[in-house]
């Protein structure tokens, strides 16, 4: 199991040929109280960098971008009823979608946990 | 929500800036000031606390000024201001406050403001104005250029201003000043709290009962901390201020009203008293009177999206068959309503409560209905 991060604060936790995508703890804290999440449909094909989901706080809407290319194979529909889960447990129950990777080498361009923590320190 | 800041100029600080930083506030640029958008508990908690207890807001960035008639005559200063705004100033009683708008010659709104006839002894012929932070320089220049001889504008940049809002506000203030706590809605008084001079009015921008308290800048932190020492009071940032006023159906200048909107389109006819509607004599009176008579082409309405997705400012409004009929001017999530709420302008033929509309959010038409405002009931102490 490997977790990688983007500069836009998405994470992908890869197990086998699929990865769980969500937003980092830093991102949820910056957004503030999440009040709405719009998820993609299962089966949707995404290219790395595509708008994959929308997360809205009281103040504003933000896009969640696909950290890698692939097909959406599962979404966390519980977020529709309880969007606040993104704040409570971003790395766990607050996940957004599961993507089956079409190009695993894209992971090499993403940050490791350690690199991401340094990146967060550099911007905060 | 944050207004674009001029990056060439350092941000201004209110007298309570250090207090916000000490409370752990997240500070953002707003109208040229470094302001708290939220404290560590977050916007939802702050919003709900204000509706259930009492919230304390720093609004010292707003513009406070006096209009003063040299001849110490209320009529002189009232006539001078009535030439710029459509409210009845002449018949204000001492210490009475009114909401109004500075109007352009075409009836567009240059800013909205609060006007109070000063009631303190020795201040006959004085009006106290509170204008928006982002507009104060333009407002003061506009007013200054149009004052008759014998009336002067005296800006009071050295005053602090805070708002105490919510169902517990009266009980909290009663411990410090029973006189202030006993005021009626839109009435003010000069009182002393802890030896500090304050001008208190029963008003606010949340839809809740509450007070706005003006004091000298050097006394502001002491008063702020005194109010916060009450367990019923928590500090509230600009984020919750926006969601509270949106649920209360109150306009935000530069968003819901601006130079393109008239007070009649904006549904602010209640702020134009009968004498002024009939007599006119203010900028844009022709348009205002025509729109009162014939009805405006478009009107500001409340809108409830039927799903959970908020529709933000700028969202296009259509009829269910796709005819474009307006645009959202403020929209977001209403914590008290527990769902998305919005306001915007629509063509008059689709403006009655219950009318089905679509909101085009991220390219998708989402069903919505025209809804009565306020979304959360006003709880003013009349």
Image (cartoon, rainbow, N blue to C red):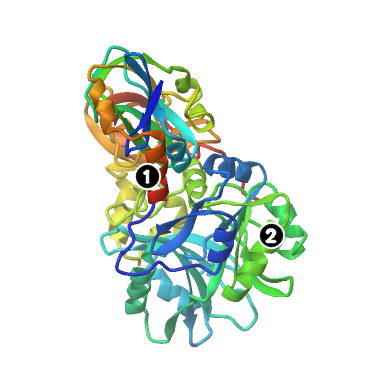
> Who is closer to the viewer here, B346 or B11?
B11
Number of residues whose C-alpha sits closer than 10 Å to that of mark 1, classed few (under 14), some (14–19) or many (20 or more): some
Instruction: Report helix, strand or loop for mark 1.
Output: helix
Query: Nearer the observer, disc 2 or disc 1?
Result: 1
Real-space Cα separation, disc 2 to disc 1, in angstroms: 40 Å
Same-chain check, marks 2 and 1:
no
Q: Residue at x 52, y 65 (%)?
A: B60
Residue name at image x 32 percent, y 20 percent: A40
State the residue position of label 2. Answer: B227
Q: Where's residue B333, x and y in %?
A: 46, 35
Q: Quadrant of residue B10?
A: bottom left
Tally of marks: 2
| Residue B148 position in % (x across, y down) | 37, 82
Q: Nearer the viewer, residue B180 or A106?
A: A106
Q: Is residue B382 visible?
A: no
Residue A92 in view here: yes
Q: Chain of mark 2?
A: B
Residue B98 x, y percent position in the rendering: 51, 61
Q: Quadrant of residue B344?
A: top left
Q: Is residue B9 above or below residue B205?
A: below
Position above or below: A120 against B100:
above
The answer for which chain carries disc 1 is A
Q: Say which residue label 1 marks.
A: A119
Could you classify mark 2 by the number of other residues whose Cα lies within 10 Å: few (under 14), some (14-19), or many (20 or more)?
many
Quarter of the figure with residue A49: top left
Q: Is residue B206 above or below residue B368?
A: below
Comparing A38 with B359, the one in front is A38
Please report contact status of discs 2 and 1: CB closer than 8 Å, yes or no.
Answer: no
């Amino acid at each position: 199991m490997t977790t990688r991060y983007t500069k836009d604060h998405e994470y992908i936790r890869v197990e086998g040929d699929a990865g769980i995508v969500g937003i980092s703890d830093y991102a949820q804290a910056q957004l503030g109280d999440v009040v709405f999440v719009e998820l993609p449909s299962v089966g949707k094909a995404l290219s790395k960098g595509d708008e994959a989901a929308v997360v809205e706080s009281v103040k504003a809407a933000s896009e969640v971008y696909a950290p890698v290319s692939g097909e959406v194979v599962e979404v966390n529909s519980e977020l529709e009823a309880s969007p606040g889960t993104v704040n409570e447990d971003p790395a766990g129950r607050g996940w957004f979608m599961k993507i089956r990777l079409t190009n695993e080498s894209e992971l090499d361009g993403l940050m490791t946990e350690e690199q991401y923590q340094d990146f967060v320190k550099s911007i905060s | 929500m944050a207004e674009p800041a001029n990056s060439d100029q350092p941000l201004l600080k209110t007298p309570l800036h250090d207090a916000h930083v000490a409370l752990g506030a997240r500070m953002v640029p707003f109208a040229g000031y470094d302001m708290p958008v939220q404290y560590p508990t977050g916007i939802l908690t702050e919003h709900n606390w204000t509706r259930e207890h009492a919230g304390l807001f720093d609004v010292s960035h707003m513009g406070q000024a006096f209009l003063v008639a040299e001849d110490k005559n209320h009529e002189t200063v009232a006539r001078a201001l009535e030439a710029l705004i459509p409210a009845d100033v002449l018949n204000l009683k001492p210490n009475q406050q009114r909401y109004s708008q500075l109007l352009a010659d075409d009836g567009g709104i240059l800013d909205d403001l609060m006007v109070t006839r000063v009631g303190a002894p020795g201040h006959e012929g004085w009006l106290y104005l509170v204008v928006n932070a982002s507009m104060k320089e333009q407002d003061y220049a506009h007013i200054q250029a149009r004052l008759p001889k014998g009336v002067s504008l005296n800006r009071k940049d050295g005053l602090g201003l805070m708002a105490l809002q919510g169902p517990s506000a009266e009980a909290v203030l009663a411990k410090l000043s029973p006189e202030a706590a006993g005021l009626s809605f839109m009435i003010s008084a000069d009182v002393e709290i802890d030896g500090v001079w304050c001008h208190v009015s029963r008003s606010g921008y949340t839809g809740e009962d509450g007070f706005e308290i003006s004091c000298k800048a050097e006394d502001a932190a002491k008063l702020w901390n005194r109010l916060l020492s009450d367990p019923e009071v928590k500090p509230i940032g600009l984020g919750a201020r926006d969601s509270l006023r949106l649920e209360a159906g109150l306009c935000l200048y530069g968003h819901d009203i601006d130079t393109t909107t008239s007070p009649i389109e904006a549904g602010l006819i209640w702020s134009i008293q009968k004498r002024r509607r009939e007599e006119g004599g203010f900028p844009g009176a022709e348009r205002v009177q025509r729109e009162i008579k014939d009805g405006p082409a478009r009107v500001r309405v409340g809108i409830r999206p039927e799903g959970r997705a908020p529709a933000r400012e700028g969202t296009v409004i259509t009829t269910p068959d796709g005819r474009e009929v307006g645009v959202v001017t403020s929209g977001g999530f209403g914590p008290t309503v527990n769902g998305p709420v919005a306001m915007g302008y629509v063509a008059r033929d689709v403006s009655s409560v219950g009318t089905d509309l679509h909101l085009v959010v991220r390219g998708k038409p989402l069903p919505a209905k025209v809804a009565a405002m306020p979304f959360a009931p006003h709880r003013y102490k009349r």
